Amino acid sequence: MTVYSLNLKVFWLLVAFLFTCSWWLFLALRRDSNVEEGGGCQENGFTHLQLLLKLCFVFLLFYIVLRCCNSTSACRHGNQDLTIHQEVQQQQLRRNLLESFYEHHIKLSPHVLGHSKAHVSQIVGELIKVGKAKQQDTGVTFRGDFVQIGSAYEQHKINSPDCFDILMPLKIPQSLKLEPLFAVAGKESTAPVLQGSTMCRVAAPKKSEWVKTYKQFSDYFCSETLHGHQLSSALVLKWFHWKIQRCLNVIRYQFEERCHITLSVCDDKLILKILPRSDYVCCHISMSVRLIPAFHLGDSVFLTAQVWSGPSHLESLNHDAHWGINFSKHEQKFLNWFKDQAPANSCHLKCLQVMKALRDLNTVTFQPFLYSQWKAILSSYNLKTVLFYLLVKIPLEKWDDTLLMDRMMDFFLFLKECLQSRVLMHFFLGNKNPPNVITLPKMFKDAQPVNLLEGYESELLDQVCFQLFNMWIQMPRILRIRSSPKSIFRDPSRCKHSNI
């Protein structure tokens, strides 16, 4: 059965029209009756008719104005509702594109990643075992087991589970002591702190013992400066490369039926390449493992020998004595704590993965210089630092996966603010108030705060900021046009580990 609804606009207009016609007919009939009785009241009746007609006209005019106002207001509200509806649709479209892109091009298979990590652990474990058994009398030896670090072990790896980072802890003679030369806040710096790196002095019980006892160690691994004997990252890397090559020659035969293992240097980084020969690795993918020599400073903090990756105009400086400071264990502890506290479907790691993927997709048209600086300024470590600050700033319940687009917007806005202010502070070094779950040695808390964007020119940071904003605006278009199989993220002309 058809149900009819009343149209109030037509109804009230019809009522006003009928009311006016009724009054007009009534007055006309009354005038005719007065005329028939006598002409004495004709002029008076005509005057009343004019007055009533004027009142009816005013009533109609008032009604029309009122309806026009209501119509304009309704139109305005209708436009606002339409705009809101369009924004919601746009937001939903962006969300759907992002989810599809994440599922098909970013998210890794836990099965493949698990097998890859197990195979890497087996090979690296054998290297460590041989390295401990064949210690040379040079002063530096292997210490303990290896340490798994990086995105593959923190659940925010993108592209493919084929690149891994492993810390290889080393130790110096027991009587020697490592003393990082941190710049203490409020005091004159004893050594430059560049992008969170530091120089490291080696202290002996007595100065005279350097010649008697530690001459070989000093010749192999130290350089003499005004600050005394300093541990040289370049010399340690050279020795480490030689040592790993010898260990690999010993274990290679154990894996010759399973895989082909080679050692190479890519941008001064030591890379162990594993190519399966058979179906021993069920996923049958080649892997690249970056081996990083490191010295333990205490409380799971390591000095790492690594190449310089800071601002280009500082590359002319001698960085052979500079060491990176690795807080991977503290980062993993913080992420695990947040995972336990946040909603079960928290999107914090997904935000970081999407940002890294968009960063890589957006470089297709960049010139080589801008490409290298873009990857350095928006390095994985800097993006992870942004995430750490957001995890502290935004309430736990707001990281629910249904709010992914809101959190992505927060990520972009915070990063944009950092680029505009030229400030992104290191989350650990010099942080007086780290999250309660993180316990840092006093020397790291008292160190001078480190700005990870220090040294980059303002024009370059502005250009990166503009490209970042454009990337957010053009995100749907980028995802539609430039998303392709996972291999699009890989640049065959560059080392897989060139941007850690």
Image (cartoon, helix red, strand yellow):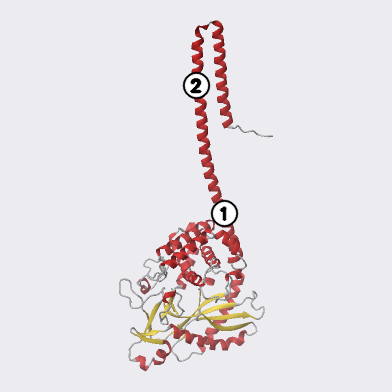
Residue for point 62% across, 67% down? 485
**Observer-nearest of 42 and 135:** 42
Where is residue 37 drawn, in percent x and y? 55, 5
Q: SS class of the residue under badge 2? A: helix
Residue lying farthest to the left in this orientation: 187
Pointer 1 or 2: first along the chain: 2
Disc number for residue 92: 1
Q: SS class of the residue under badge 1? A: helix
Measure the alpha-carbon separation of dots 1 and 2: 56 Å
The quadrant in which residue 202 appears is bottom left
Rendered view: 158 above or below 74: below
The type of residue carrying mark 2 is Lys
Which quadrant of the rendered structure holds the N terminus?
top right
**Observer-nearest of 235 and 469:** 469
Where is residue 381 drawn, in percent x and y? 47, 70
Q: Is residue 295 visible?
A: yes
Q: Nearer the viewer, mark 1 or mark 2?
A: 2
Q: Is residue 299 visible?
A: no
Residue at the disc numbered 2: 54
The quadrant in which residue 322 appears is bottom left
The quadrant in which residue 452 appears is bottom left
